[in-house]
Image: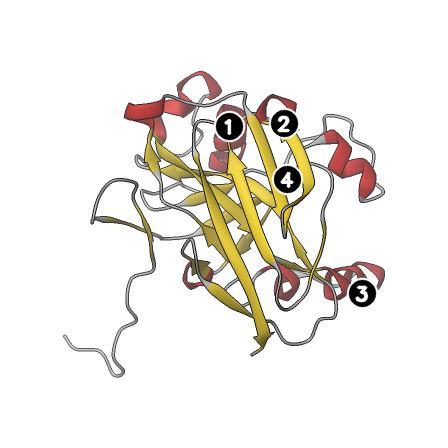
Amino acid sequence: MSFVIPPMETASVAVSGSEDRFPVRRIFCVGRNYAAHAREMGRDPDREPPFFFTKPADAVVDDGATIPYPPQTENLHYEAELVVAIGAGGRDIAADRALEHVWGYGVGNDLTRRDMQNAAKELRRPWDLSKGFDRSAVIGPLVPASEIGHPSKGRISLSVNGEMKQDGDLAEMIWPVQDVVAFLSQSVALKPGDLIMTGTPAGVGALVPGDRCDVVIEGVGEITTLIGPRG
């Protein structure tokens, strides 16, 4: 068998301390997983079941990259997030066994075309393109869980040009990692290579060309992204 067009390259993210890379199959994202962020987005932070949206695998961007300001937006937002890398697949995974399926963790920035998202919400239309556009998933080097364990608390912060914008703690997640993995596995069969971006603390805001955005998660790592001119 041969392909009628050249097959695409496998999307991947870096692995800390290694030249090897982690292949990316799918990227799932949890919406409104911090109560304070839910409130700033005008939502009730009650502990409802988590909901998910996706980004294309090839939306991943490495630490240190310069990202052209994306088209069709005047309000590009940052969102600092803990990223979970799935190393063992499964369906209907029990929460008390979910962390056994996690290969490692990374630092992420879920870039969002907020004006496009808000317009889609107003019209009750899907807002996939507000989240799943080119170079919208900044993900730093993954650290194996075998080295750092499974972080359930620790500072998560984001600064723009040295000014702190987001400052929270992983312990503030409405749904911790094990519950997120368990819930998601009820909807889809998780596979090795799947990534989960676990939500962002309060303080989201806009980026403009020329900005430097830094995300730090205690015990996991840090990433830097530069915003370039419009692409």
**Contact, CB < 8 Å: mark 4 with mark 3?**
no
To which quarter of the image does residue 51 belong?
top right
Between residue 198 and residue 205, name the one nearer to us.
205
Q: How far separated are the C-alphas under marks 3 and 1?
A: 30 Å
Q: Quadrant of the C terminus?
A: bottom right
Left or right: 19 in relation to 27 = left
Q: Secondary structure at mark 3?
A: helix
Residue that numbered label 4 is attached to: 200
Please rate how many residues cluster around mark 4, counting C-alpha atoms within 10 Å: few if below 14, some from 14 to 19, many from 20.
Answer: many
Residue that numbered label 2 is attached to: 173
Residue that numbered label 1 is attached to: 177
Q: Secondary structure at mark 4?
A: loop
Identity of the amino acid at label 3? Ala
Above or below residue 114? Residue 35 is above
Left or right: 179 in relation to 37 = left
Q: Position of residue 143 (x, y in %)?
A: 34, 35
